[in-house]
Image (cartoon, grey):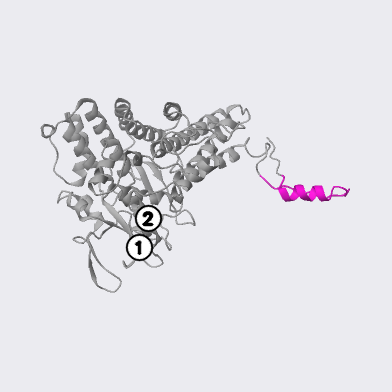
């Protein structure tokens, strides 16, 4: 398809100069032509790479998911800079609104990723000039990405407009039913799983395990327990993943591309590619490596959460309970609700606010606990459920559990604690609480004026304003 671009200025100029015989013809420089873009491997691959960029959400988009989830769950709070008023307080008090800019930016990023996936799927469907292997593999990656984006949209906003092709003239669509959205997510990810390899040459590209992990999380959050348990077992049976031996060094720069990473977001120090999470959560008076800086904000952990860990738990080692500040003074964090997080340590090669620290959105430990949780929901405590939990606890150096110590209800509550201890500040606290049915009640216990509608975020107001067929989520 030829892309014909006529600007309003050019059109006015043509009308004004209509009597001239020798017009200056503007030469359009663009790769977006039928001959050399969407019919070539290079062109299709460029669109696919951009879809991956939207999934990785460069800049602070993905990092804000960490702080929002931790603050929302009540284990941490934010202070300092504009972050306190614009992000920390609204997520602490559940006073976020449909005009919150991160909602609209994130929504746009997800839908841009969906658009790119649709471009690939549409243009490869009847393309006979490319190899079958390339078409099959690339379509599978595009479907896995589309399934990923829609699973996040469904989880955060509920039913939303479903765009499955760029070959339409109608851009304003109403909400699709949750059933329609779920059917697409399951179909996309299932198709991808049947094609994707167990490993890729390029780190960060989706594999069979990645698509299975996205599907497993989706099944968990929609409470399809048997499907979730089966999918977790499929991941385990790939024999591609295992728990990294040392939790404390798991998240550092030196141990990237480890055996536990399934869905990972690579980061580089390059402009707009680096991670800013270290700069976001390190107090301003903490000495850093040369040429590195941090923001005026800080994310601090409540003593109550730290006290919930077993005394021998190695995972506590990534909390900084006291430190020597830039002035040489001792700052006592623990005991004053001022412990800070060192889960993502500074990158020795970092620059300014940027670090090349990769993020693991889903790792193997989560799959083990997903299967344990799903099996408990199906059958209550069994030895297999306890064994799965103990695999994670063993690495943390905490006492192992016994099956006789729990009934189904008490084990459900304990698995939620296990997930908090294992995945704190990995952007999973909010969804775990929602799935557990305690997100609102726990907030109310903290004195927050919370209601059931808070389990969904509002549709960005600019989207509602632009689309007359799209109504706002209840309560907003």
Query: Foreground residue, 151 or 16?
Result: 16
Compared with 350, 104 (above or below) is above
- Mark 1 vs mark 2: give the one in front: 1
Residue 277's disc number: 2
Location of residue 445 in the rendering, given as x and y in whole percent from the top left corner: 22, 46
Any magenta on residue 233? no
The mark that comes first in sequence, 1 or 2, is: 1
Residue 70's tag is none
The foreground one among 226 and 213 is: 226
Figure check: 238 above or below 332: above
Q: Residues within 10 Å of mark 2 (few under 14, many from 20)?
A: many
Looking at the rendering, the stretch of residues picked out in magenta corresponds to: 6-30
Q: How far across and down, in percent of the image, does residue 171 sit?
A: 58, 35
Q: Secondary structure at mark 1?
A: loop
User: Dot 2: what SS?
Assistant: helix
Horizontally, is 173 left or right of 75 in the view? right
Residue 344 place in picture, x, y as percent: 33, 54
Residue 53 visible? The answer is no
Q: Is residue 140 left or right of residue 399?
A: right
In this picture, residue 282 sits left or right of residue 159: left
Q: Residue at x 16, y 35 (%)?
A: 410
The quarter of the picture where residue 288 lies is bottom left
Query: Residue 222 appears at what percent x and percent y?
Result: 34, 31
Q: Nearer the viewer, residue 300 or 467?
A: 467
Quarter that holds the C terminus: top left
Residue 80: mark in rendering: 1
Q: Taking the image as drawn, is residue 279 in sight?
A: yes
Residue at the location (56% across, 42% down)? Answer: 46
* Alpha-carbon span between mark 1 and mark 2: 15 Å
- Magenta stretch containing residue 8, yes or no? yes
């Amino acid at each position: 398809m030829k892309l014909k671009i006529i600007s309003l200025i050019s059109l006015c100029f043509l009308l004004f100069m209509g009597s001239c015989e020798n017009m200056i013809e503007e030469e359009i420089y663009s790769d977006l032509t039928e001959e050399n873009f969407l019919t070539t491997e290079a062109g299709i691959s460029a669109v696919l790479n951009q879809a991956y960029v939207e999934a990785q959400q460069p800049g602070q988009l993905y990092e804000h998911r960490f702080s929002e989830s931790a603050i929302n769950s009540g284990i941490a709070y934010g202070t300092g800079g504009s972050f306190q008023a614009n992000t920390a307080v609204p997520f602490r008090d559940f006073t976020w609104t449909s005009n919150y800019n991160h909602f609209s930016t994130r929504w746009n990023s997800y839908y841009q990723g969906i658009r790119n996936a649709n471009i690939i799927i549409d243009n490869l469907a009847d393309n006979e000039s490319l190899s079958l292997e390339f078409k099959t593999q690339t379509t599978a990656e595009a479907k896995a990405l589309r399934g990923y984006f829609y699973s996040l949209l469904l989880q955060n906003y509920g039913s939303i407009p479903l765009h499955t092709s760029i070959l339409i003239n109608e851009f304003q669509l109403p909400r699709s039913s949750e059933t329609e959205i779920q059917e697409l997510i399951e179909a996309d990810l299932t198709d991808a799983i049947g094609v994707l390899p167990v490993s890729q040459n390029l780190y960060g590209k989706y594999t069979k395990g990645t698509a299975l992990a996205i599907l497993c999380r989706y099944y968990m959050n929609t409470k399809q327990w048997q499907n979730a348990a089966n999918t977790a077992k499929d991941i385990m049976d790939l024999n591609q993943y295992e728990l990294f031996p040392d939790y404390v060094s798991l998240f550092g720069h030196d141990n990237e591309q480890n055996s536990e990473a399934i869905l990972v977001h690579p980061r580089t120090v390059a402009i707009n590619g680096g991670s800013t999470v270290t700069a976001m959560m390190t107090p301003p008076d903490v000495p850093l490596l040369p040429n590195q800086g941090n923001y005026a904000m800080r994310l601090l952990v409540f003593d109550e959460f730290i006290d919930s860990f077993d005394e021998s738990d190695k995972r506590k080692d990534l909390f900084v309970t006291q430190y020597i500040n830039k002035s040489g003074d001792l700052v006592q964090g623990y005991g004053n609700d001022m412990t800070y997080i060192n889960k993502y340590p500074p990158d020795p090669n970092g620059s300014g606010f940027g670090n090349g620290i990769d993020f693991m959105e889903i790792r193997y430990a989560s799959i083990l606990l997903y299967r344990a949780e799903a099996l408990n929901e199906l059958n209550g405590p069994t030895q297999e459920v306890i064994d799965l939990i103990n695999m994670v606890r063993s690495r943390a150096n905490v006492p192992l559990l016994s099956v006789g110590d729990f009934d189904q209800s008490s084990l459900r509550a304990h698995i939620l604690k296990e997930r908090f201890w294992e995945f704190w500040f990995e952007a999973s606290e909010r969804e775990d609480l929602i799935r557990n049915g305690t997100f609102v009640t726990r907030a109310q216990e903290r004195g927050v004026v919370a209601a059931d509608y808070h389990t969904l975020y509002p549709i960005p107001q600019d989207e509602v304003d632009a689309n007359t067929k799209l109504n706002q989520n209840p309560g907003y």
